[in-house]
Structure formats: structure tokens, C-alpha cells
Amino acid sequence: MHPLHRETHLIQRIGWLRAAVLGANDGIISTASLMVGVAAASTAAGEVLVAGIAGLVAGAMSMAAGEYVSVNSQADTENADLERERRELAEQPEAELDELTQIYVDRGVEPALARQVAQQMMAKDAFATHARDELGLSEHVVARPIQAALTSAVTFAVGAALPLLIAIAAPVGWTASAVSGGSLVGLAILGALGARAGGASAFKPTVRVTFWGAFAMAVTAVIGSLVGHAV
């Protein structure tokens, strides 16, 4: 007899992976774009660094607050649906049994067998069964506001640190070019690592994140240059 085969699925990473990739990506793009925009408007290296530090702190706090609020909203919706399901199971158990049976039938199970499976599943844990099979909610996809907020804040700060370090090390007069080039390399690496962590092909995510990062920096540089000359 073969030993029990256990699998670890990559979708279990989706909660923290989405927040981590989003945070680091935003950290690099927004901070690099801000610094490039300021560099296009001013030649003072100190102003560029101040802008970068301010962008890092403000961006990390914004990401944490935004993720916490948005994921909490998702959690509120999930909890409302779960509470309604709990109430319906208490008040209309037969209707819920019929509903679960139909779900299995729609998935390709023969009606008689679907009824038997639904009865056995509800006998074991009716609430968990309906949460999973009717609402599509399970442990690895449920909303976790605090996890999302902390992950986004930390990864944003880590991402934002890259253009700052490049600006500090860049020769005088080369800040904008160095920050742009180094940040694009960082974005390409981030795209590849995020794809690898999620088990996907690295090519498309890498091209996608690099392209939009370059676009954001180019637009900010043009606007910064125009504003700098205007004032």
C-alpha cells in the first residue's frame, strides 16, 4: 500500500504573495518615479534624496492603510455571507441539502451519488462544506487584513530602498539615469521572482512589470522637467 501522498499547492501562497509583489513593485516604481521626476526638475542631489525618503515613508504607510481597509472590506463581505449561510443551515437544512446536491450534480456527479455525498458532507461539517463548495471560501483564500497590511508595508519599504541606495551611490549628475536603469533591473528581477514563487512562467510577468515601470518613470520625468522649467 502506498503511503499517504501530501501535496502543497502554490495557491496557498496567494494571500501573502499578492501583497508582497504589489508592495515591492509599488515601492520601486513610485519611489524611483518620484526621484526621477524631482531630478528632472532640480539638479540638487539632496532634494532628490529627501523626496525619495519621503516617498518611502509615505508610501509604506499608504500601502499598509490601503491594504488593511480594502482587505477588511473583503472580510466584511465574506463574514456577512458566512453568517447568512449559518442562518440558512439552521432554518432550512433540507433546502441547503438540495442546493449542495445540485452543486455536485452541476460538477458532473450522478444525482443519486451527489445526494449521498451531500448528506455525508453535511453530516460531518455542514457549515464548512457550504462555505467551501457554495461560497468558494477556504482557509488559503480567506481575507487576512493584518497580514496583507504588514506584508505590503514591509515589501514597499524594501522595494523603495533600492532607488534610494542607487541614488546615494550614483555619480554626481547621473542620479536620474542610474535610478532609472537600476530600478528597471530590480523590477525585472522582482517580476521573475514573483512568477517563480507563484509557479508561473517568468517571461510575461517580467516584461509586464518592467514595461510599466519604465512608462511610469518616463511620464514622471517629462512632467518633472516641464514643471521644473515652468517654476
Image (spheres, helix red, strand yellow):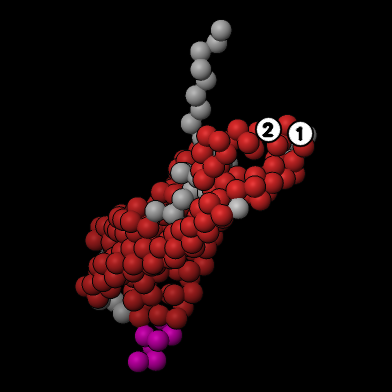
Q: Is residue 55 left or right of residue 80?
A: left
- Per the rendering, the mark at residue 116 is 2
**Compared to 49, does 151 lie above or below?**
above
Q: State which quarter of the image contains the C terminus.
A: bottom left
x and y, in percent, of residue 127 in the image:
51, 45
From where the camera sits, is residue 126 visible? yes
Q: Is residue 149 left or right of residue 4?
A: left
x and y, in percent, of residue 101 in the image:
69, 42
Q: State which quarter of the image contains the N terminus.
A: top right
From where the camera sits, is residue 163 visible? no
Task: Report if residue 110 lies within the magenta region.
Answer: no
**Compared to 202, does 157 lie above or below?**
below
Please name the residue shown 35% across and 80% down the image: 41
Tags 2 and 1 touching, CB below 8 Å: yes
Q: Which residues are magenta?
A: 225-231
- Per the rendering, the mark at residue 112 is 1
Please name the residue shown 41% across and 49% down the image: 16
x and y, in percent, of residue 51 in the image:
28, 73
x and y, in percent, of residue 24 in the image:
38, 55
Q: Nearer the viewer, residue 56 or 82?
A: 82
Q: Is residue 44 left or right of residue 193?
A: left
Circle 2: residue type: Gln
Please name the residue shown 55% across and 35% down the image: 123
